[in-house]
Image: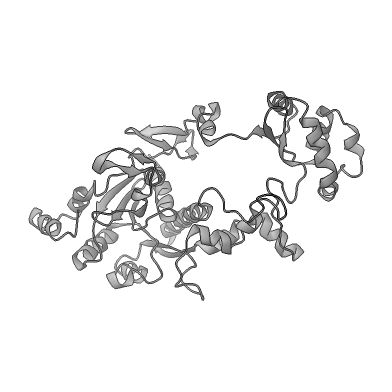
Amino acid sequence: MKPLQGIKVLDLSRVLAGPWCTQLLADLGAEVIKIERPGVGDDTRHWGPPWFGDGEDRVAAYFLSCNRGKRSAAIDFAQPDGANLVRRLADQADVVVENFKVGGLRKFGLDAETLRKANPRLIYASITGFGQDGPYADRAGYDFIIQGMGGMMSVTGLPDGEPGGAPMRAGVAIVDLFTGMYTSVSILAALFNRERTGEGATIDMALFDTQIAVMANQASNALVSGRDPPRQGNTHPNIVPYQPFDAADQPIIIAVGNDRQFGRLASICGHEEWITDPRFATNEARVANRSELVPLVAQSIATRPAAEWLEALEKSGIPAGPINRLTQALEDVQIQHRQMVRAIAGVPQVGSPVRIDGERTDAELPPPKLGQHTAQVLDDLRLQSAEIDRLKAAGIVG
């Protein structure tokens, strides 16, 4: 029995942050009903190439990344009868997740106040760009823009003055993903609290808030120093040496986390004098003298192939690794052993990283076809067949 078995989630979200949240809830055992617009569905169904499948069943790989474990019901809640169906589903739900603009669902009677009045135990989670209040509340929020506004791009990329030096976004939509994770954690906390109080909750999650929060040590550095952290490419603002180095055949990453590890690195490089050199003896000194130490380490690493260095570094307990292409990472023996790459009903998936008591928590339903489960969902509402036929003829369900 999975931890969230028996919990019903109504997913009104689309694109990434909301679906990422609800996919995690599905992996943990929740029943997730994804409401999609008939004939169109979630925008990401069309964000290809690459595509999976052919003909009417063709779907973008993007959609597959964040929608396993869900049932898809195609209901047009812009029409009154459709909105009524979704309200009835919300009456039966434990959780609603949505990511419309602030106030966007009020005109359909699908806002938190309306649904929680009818179902006080409901946990209603809203995801927006900037939150439910404040001077930016009415703005649309997109991951790329939030990475720019929230400082992520200011610390990502090569330094000014170097070839290609410019602010750079992360290679995945990191703000959407973290917001989805924070939202799922908030929902779990609200479910736990409901067990004690019997009351649901209204959760207000903002991409901008999340971006500021996950700036972590960089934000703390700025608050303490009063200065903007610079872009440092692949180096670390607080630890040295902590970056890629070119071995004789290919680059490797060496990540020295403390003075003991640095001492072992100095020894296997054949330069034990670095251990007592006042310029390098402590991490604080190494950060201050980065420009002197890094070329010395680089000169040593360049003398041997990557495989030799990685073996020696592992034996010495110094964190190190190769720089893989994504296909190499997906084929890595550790990833294969952990069964992180799998197929559900023939659909390729990266699995959930969550294991509880040695058991994987992946949902066993593949990402759904648009409207695949509409009939099942309507049957749960005990609609008569004549009523279902009328709704289909009117284009309210699909």
Residue 141 to residue 368: above or below: below
Residue located at (25% from left, 41% from top): 55
Q: Residue at x 45, y 35 (%)?
A: 360
**Residue 393: % across, % down:** 12, 58
Q: Position of residue 370 (x, y in %)?
A: 26, 48
Above or below residue 397? Residue 254 is above
**Above or below, comparing residue 226 to residue 330 in the picture:** below
Q: Is residue 143 left or right of residue 27?
A: right
The percent position of residue 130, horizontal first and vertical second, equals 49, 67
Image colouring: one colour
Q: Quadrant of residue 2?
A: top left
Q: Position of residue 5 (x, y in %)?
A: 36, 45
Residue at the image point whose x is 71% and y is 55% from the top: 160
How many numbered marks have been drawn onto this rendered protein structure? Answer: 0
213 and 95: which one is in front?
Answer: 213
Of the pair 193 and 91, the residue shown nearer to us: 91
Name the quarter where the N terminus is drawn: top left
Viewer-proximal residue, 194 or 225?
225
Choose top left, top right, bottom left or bottom right for residue 43: bottom left
Question: Residue pushed farthest left?
Answer: 386
Q: Residue at x 84, y 29 (%)?
A: 267
The residue most toward the bottom is 135
Q: In the figure, 239 relative to 191: above or below?
A: above
